[in-house]
Image: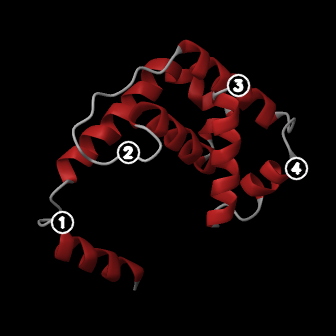
């Protein structure tokens, strides 16, 4: 049932999705950035978890394109080594559960809930800018 609905949405919007290529380029740029900076290390980090990877992806996107980025042409911002280092250090803290209990709850219980995702994202935003 779900797949039929998903297929219907793709059929309806895929060919008319004007900004598809811009979004694909940005997605690829963020994935390449993560790969260049973490590479194989990511499989040994907390970010190997899908929920945490989504948070990592989101914060890297924000650092690269801005908090309220439109899809207008933008030159991606360079993410500093300090940002990357802060995120990797936080991965260790997450794995050791040395993070606020609200964040632990957000990443272990209601992981698909929007409020949980916001808690994780705000936490990563604070850490990356420390």
Is residue 92 found left or right of 72 in the rendered image? right
The image shows residue 35 at horizontal and vertical percentages of: 44, 25
Q: Which one is earlier in the sequence, the residue at label 3 or at label 4?
A: 4
Residue at point 70% right, 25% down? 130
Left or right of residue 38: residue 1: left
- In this figure, which residue is indicated by the disc labeled 3? 130
Q: Work out how far the residue at label 4 is from the one at label 2, CA to CA, in angstroms.
A: 31 Å
How packed mark 3 is, by other alpha carbons closer than 10 Å (few <14, some 14-19, many 20 or more), is few
Which is closer to the viewer, label 3 or label 4? 3
In three-dimensional space, the C-alpha distance between marks 1 and 2, rounded to whole angstroms, equals 22 Å
Camera-side residue of 73 and 27: 73
The numbered disc on residue 14 is: 1
Of the residues under marks 4 and 1, which one precedes in the sequence?
1
Determine which residue is flagged by label 4: 101
> Which badge, 4 or 2, is on the more N-terminal residue?
2
Mark 4 or 2, closer to the camera: 2
Element class at badge 3: loop
Q: Residue at x 58, y 45 (%)?
A: 55
- Residue at x 66% of width, y 46% of height: 122
């Amino acid at each position: 049932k779900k797949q039929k609905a998903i297929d219907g949405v793709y059929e309806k919007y895929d060919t008319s999705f004007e900004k598809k290529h811009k979004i694909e380029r940005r997605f690829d740029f963020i994935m390449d950035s993560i790969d260049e900076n973490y590479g194989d290390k990511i499989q040994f980090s907390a970010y190997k978890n899908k929920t945490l990877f989504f948070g990592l992806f989101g914060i890297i996107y924000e650092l690269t394109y801005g908090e309220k980025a439109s899809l207008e042409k933008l030159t991606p911002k360079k993410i500093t080594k300090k940002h990357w280092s802060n995120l990797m250090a936080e991965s260790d803290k997450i794995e050791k559960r040395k993070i606020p209990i609200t964040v632990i709850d957000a990443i272990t219980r209601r992981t698909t809930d929007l409020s949980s995702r916001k808690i994780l994202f705000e936490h990563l935003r604070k850490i990356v800018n420390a």
